[in-house]
Amino acid sequence: MEGTGFEGAPLAGAGGVASLEQVLDRIEAAVGELAGLVAPEVLEGWGAPTITRLMQAHTRIRKVTARLEGVRFTVLPRIEDDGSWRSGGMSRTFASWLRLREGVSASTARKDVTTARRLAQALPGTRERLVAGTLGVDHARVMAEVAPTSRTRQDALAWLVETRTGEVTTPEVFVDMVAVDLPDPADDPDGTHTATGSRRCWLRRSPRGPW
């Protein structure tokens, strides 16, 4: 008979699909085991992993971490939309609730909430790539920062040209190749500065000729 776990969450029966809590328990146990394998006394001992193995491990850890961030950004909008975080009246905003519950700074909570919202609303493909491990967390955050939030911003981002090839690209592909430095949407609500910055810094050529 199926039981219940943390906060009433169902536990999978024999042969059933594992619950969130069971998977998280395994991840936490694996992280603890991994930490033990790279403890200072191990790295300084005779049986320490080679530098090549450590380099490979570091790359894999970064990718796994990015994938977990993608999962977290998938969960956050669902929690926000549900609205039950408002119960108790302790927090007026979702970012404030997140800050208090998880003990992070206000700026971190705001960035997480904004990133999760924009990935859900405007860039679901970017979030899928992040979860799949084919896109880094930094690129996903940049994409969220330049996500279209107004008609002007959409127009400014519509004709990105990779200046080395002259080929029309997309914001996602462009971020993979070129550093992005556009105004935060909160500082540029109508997209004016986004358009100006894009034209001055990036759009050297387009299918319609020079700007």
Image (tube, rainbow, N blue to C red):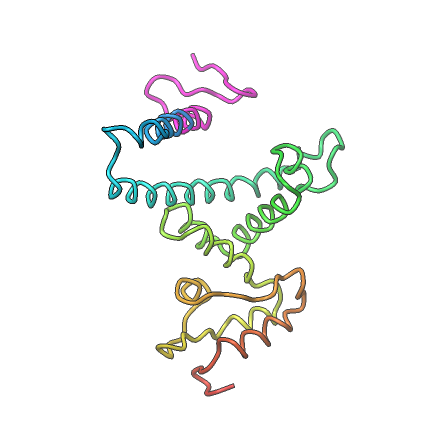
Placement of 80 over or under 41, stated as above or below: below
Placement of 168 over or under 150, stated as above or below: below
Residue 146 in magenta stretch: no
Does residue 175 appear left or right of residue 185 in this picture?
left
Residue ID at (52%, 70%): 157
Placement of 199 over or under 110, stated as above or below: below
What is the magenta range?
A: 1-27
Count up the numbered dots: 0
**Residue 25 or residue 49, whichever sits in front:** 49
**Residue 192 or residue 9, whichever sits in front:** 192
Residue 65: x, y in percent? 42, 41
Residue 73: x, y in percent? 51, 44
Placement of 161 over or under 22, stated as above or below: below
Residue farthest bottom in this picture: 209
Residue 38: x, y in percent? 34, 31
Residue ID at (52%, 76%): 201
Residue 140: x, y in percent? 47, 54
Does residue 187 appear left or right of residue 50 in this picture?
right
Residue 11 in magenta stretch: yes
Q: Quadrant of the N terminus?
A: top left
Residue ID at (50%, 65%): 180
Location of residue 53 by image quarter: top left
Residue ID at (66%, 60%): 186
**Residue 92 or residue 136, whichever sits in front:** 136
Location of residue 31 by image quarter: top left
Location of residue 28 by image quarter: top left
Does residue 85 appear left or right of residue 133 in this picture?
right
